[in-house]
Image (tube, rainbow, N blue to C red):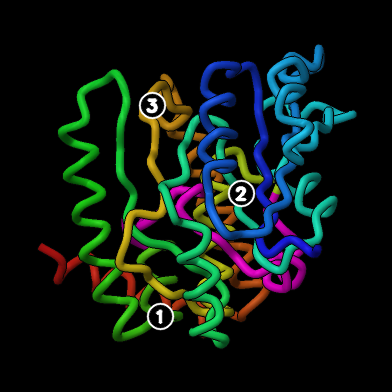
Amino acid sequence: MKPEISVVIPTFRRPRELNQTISSVLAQKGVALEILVIDDCPDGSAEDIVRPFAERGVVYHRNPSPSGGRPALVRNLGWKLTSGDLVHFLDDDDLVPEGHYAAVIEAAANNPGKGIFFGEVETFGDVDLTSEKEFWQVARRRSRYLGRISPRFGLAAQMFFGSTMLICSAAVIRRSCVEALDGFNGSLPLMEDVDFYGRAIRRFGAKVMDRVTIRYRLGPSLMHRPNVQPAVIASYQGMYARYRAERGAFDFYALKVFGVGLRKIWF
């Protein structure tokens, strides 16, 4: 039976979290799944974690050329090995909510003109969640509003020129869209998911689902490491350069004006 959703899980030395992540995927009901774990660790540390799940269809694959901390490269390796019509790029420490994949399949069937499906991010973890919860509550309100009035241009403008409305694990995307975009931009130091989903939403449109679409585990982040600002600047420069190359200067500056305008009206 052809899988309805292919789940690609890049991993690097997170045994406890990976076990929980895989378990949350296998708990989904009534959906044909293809589950691929891509181990980016040179010593193959995740193989022992995945082995007990093999009889339930979870496939282990070791990256022959470890990325050195570039998840975009690992995701690009993974999706090319899958065959589902929908693809979920799931981080190895996040959890899939109960019933999520069935809801995505229904949303995809009811919205054939949309390529991306995402919704609310629910945070959890052993750190202070106050500010993050507030951030994602605001993101939910903005995404729902823009999803109604401008599911391509407006959502993309917010992604590129405002605060993000999703993390990589929060969205499921049609495989045809991944192929058309040729996957993630592996040259970006950071925020490769913002670039990928921003370009995908601009081109294919998104359905903003009225439900939690990922449980996001909070912990140490590359975005919070010391001296990260040069990498952030380089990532934005790379994102904007690729967008202009793909869609032209007029579209880029129109998107920028709209995005900057959104920043002025949000409260």
Q: Residue, x 53% and y 81% (percent of image)?
A: 114
Q: Position of residue 239 (x, y in %)?
A: 57, 57
Q: Is residue 82 above or below residue 62?
A: below
Q: Residue, x 55% and y 87% (percent of image)?
A: 113
Give the Cα separation between the discs numbered 3 and 1.
Answer: 30 Å
SS label for mark 2:
strand
Q: Position of residue 52 (x, y in %)?
A: 72, 22
Residue 73 appearing in the image: no
Q: Nearer the viewer, residue 59 or 74?
A: 59
| Nearest-to-viewer mark from 3 and 2 | 2
| Nearest-to-viewer mark from 3 and 1 | 1
Q: Nearer the viewer, residue 135 or 103?
A: 103
SS label for mark 1:
loop
Task: Check disc 1: other Cα within 10 Å, few if <14, some if 14-19, many if 20+.
Answer: many
Q: Is residue 30 above or below residue 151?
A: above
Label disc, if present, on residue 89 of the rendered structure:
2
Q: Position of residue 142 (x, y in %)?
A: 24, 66
The span shown in magenta is 161-185
Residue 175 is inside the magenta segment: yes
**Horizontal side, residue 24 vs residue 39: left or right:** left
Q: Position of residue 161 (x, y in %)?
A: 37, 62
Q: Nearer the viewer, residue 172 or 162?
A: 172
Amino acid type of the residue that numbered disc 2 sits on in the rendered structure:
Phe
Label disc, if present, on residue 224 of the rendered structure:
3
Q: Which residue is mark 1?
A: 151
Q: Residue, x 58% and y 48% (percent of image)?
A: 192
Amino acid type of the residue that numbered disc 3 sits on in the rendered structure:
His
